[in-house]
Amino acid sequence: MGLLDGRVAIVTGAGRGIGREFALCFAREGASVVVNDVGVSLDGRGTEEDPAAAVCKEIEALGSNAVQNYDSVTDFDGAANITRTAVDAFGTVDILVNNAGIVRDKTLLKMDESDFDSVVAVHMKGTFNCTRHAA
């Protein structure tokens, strides 16, 4: 019996790193998890990997339920679909972890406006978008 039996968690950016660990921890405690990850590296480049599907397989191997979602947190309608994925698959949302993030590892004088806009879109707007729809 887990601490989160019957609960439903959404974790954005859950394909790698700390987001993956959040998702696995929730699953170990009995939660069903929506693993959201757009499948790109931290610097925004595309990859051939499917980290969301890989984490879902790990969660299922633990005996919990998971479903992947590939919508971008930066898109208002995409964020709505992340929540919709949870409700359609598991009936509700109990937990939201706004973990999605990107890195533009540049100093202020080397960062251009598009780099800044990308960081703000994921970290700030993405947090608003997902929280708004989950609430």
Image: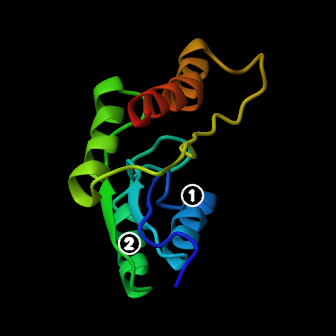
Which residue carries the number 1 mark?
19
Q: Which of the 4 quarters of the picture holds residue 130?
A: top left
Q: Is residue 52 left or right of residue 106?
A: left
User: What's the residue at 68%, 20% (across, down)?
Assistant: 111
Q: CA distance from mark 2 to mark 1?
A: 13 Å
Question: Which element type, helix, strand or loop, lies under badge 1?
Answer: helix
- Label 2 or label 1, whichever lies nearer to me, is 1
User: What's the residue at 57%, 57% (across, down)?
Assistant: 19
Task: Check disc 1: other Cα within 10 Å, few if <14, some if 14-19, many if 20+.
Answer: many
Which amino acid is tagged 1? Gly
In-front residue for pair 48/24? 24
Which amino acid is tagged 2? Ala
Residue 61 image point, x, y percent? 39, 87
Relative to 76, does residue 83 appear above or below in the rendering?
below
Question: Which element type, helix, strand or loop, lies under badge 2?
Answer: helix
Q: Are marks 2 and 1 in contact (CB under 8 Å)?
A: no
Which residue carries the number 2 mark?
54
Seen as rendered, the residue at the extreme left is 88
In-front residue for pair 3/101? 3
Q: Quadrant of the C terminus?
A: top left
Relative to 3, does residue 40 appear above or below in the rendering?
above
Residue 35 image point, x, y percent? 40, 58
Residue 79 image point, x, y percent? 36, 34
Q: Is residue 57 left or right of residue 12?
A: left
